[in-house]
Amino acid sequence: MKIALIGYGKMGHEIERIALSRGHEIVSIIDKDNTADYDTEAFSSADVAIEFSAPSVAFDNIKEAFARGVKVVSGTTGWIADKEKEVKELCANGATLFWASNFSLGVAIFSAVNKYLATIMNRFDNYDVSMTEVHHIHKLDAPSGTAITLAEQILQRLDRKEKWVKEEENSKTDLAIHSLREGEVPGIHTIRYESEADSITITHDAKNRSGFALGAVLAAEYAAKHKGFLTMDDMFDF
């Protein structure tokens, strides 16, 4: 498969390594200093572009790829809430985007556990729930996109919670997300249910970026054979 990379930071380099190890070809690498390379035969020849950039430019990058008939896998967070309707309309008209707040296979499994646990805990209102997420100091958005996705999964299943909030809950119907930025932490997400009697905690702790990169390449392999707006739920039937 021919892959274009949009964004060539630490994630871009790791995705390149994983893609080459799986027998794929990197035909184009676009970063902030060479965006004119969208207008090259090399970029247009890609089966899929994998995009990890910044929230301020992600949607523009995706539209550049769509304009050249290239499918996109994007792991950039902090933009889709404002552009989800528009991007889904583009996908309904023939474009393909595989978007996820987190491509880690471990997080996909953790997400399934989160949904199941929230369904169970809906029966036990003596437990309050909160979340803590820790990332490296370079991460721009807080809470993380993964934390928001996990929180929304809980809100869909826990009747006593109405919305997520940053840091501290203002009422019993709030789900608090605490965000910490420390060193070079790839990502830690912890969900805690607590009562006067005990607590139940689940945690996903990423050791490095390789799990995210592998998941992004697997998503590209999936997107190459499918169309429309795709998510991890399409690729994994948990």
Image (cartoon, rainbow, N blue to C red):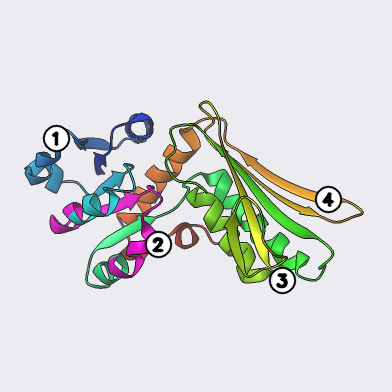
Q: Secondary structure at mark 3?
A: loop
Q: Amino acid at mark 4?
A: Ser
Q: Mark 2 highlights which residue? A: 81
Q: Is residue 84 left or right of residue 158?
A: left
**113 or 132, which lies in front?**
132
Q: Which residues are magenta?
A: 64-86
Q: Is residue 40 left or right of residue 206?
A: left
Q: Is residue 163 left or right of residue 41?
A: right
Q: Mark 4 highlights which residue? A: 199
Q: CA distance from mark 2 to mark 3?
A: 24 Å
Question: Which is more N-terminal, label 1 or label 4?
Answer: 1
Q: Are marks 2 and 3 in contact (CB under 8 Å)?
A: no
**176 or 71, which lies in front?**
176
Specify the farthest residue to the top.
183
Give residue 52's quadrant in the image: top left
Q: Secondary structure at mark 2?
A: helix
In this picture, is 211 found above or below 128?
A: above
How crowded pointer 2 is (Cα within 10 Å; few <14, some 14-19, many 20+) is rated as few
Question: Which is more N-terminal, label 1 or label 2?
Answer: 1
Q: Mark 3 highlights which residue? A: 160
40 inside magenta stretch: no
Q: Mark 1 highlights which residue? A: 34
Question: Which is more N-terminal, label 2 or label 4?
Answer: 2
Q: Are marks 4 and 2 in contact (CB under 8 Å)?
A: no
Q: CA distance from mark 4 to mark 1?
A: 51 Å
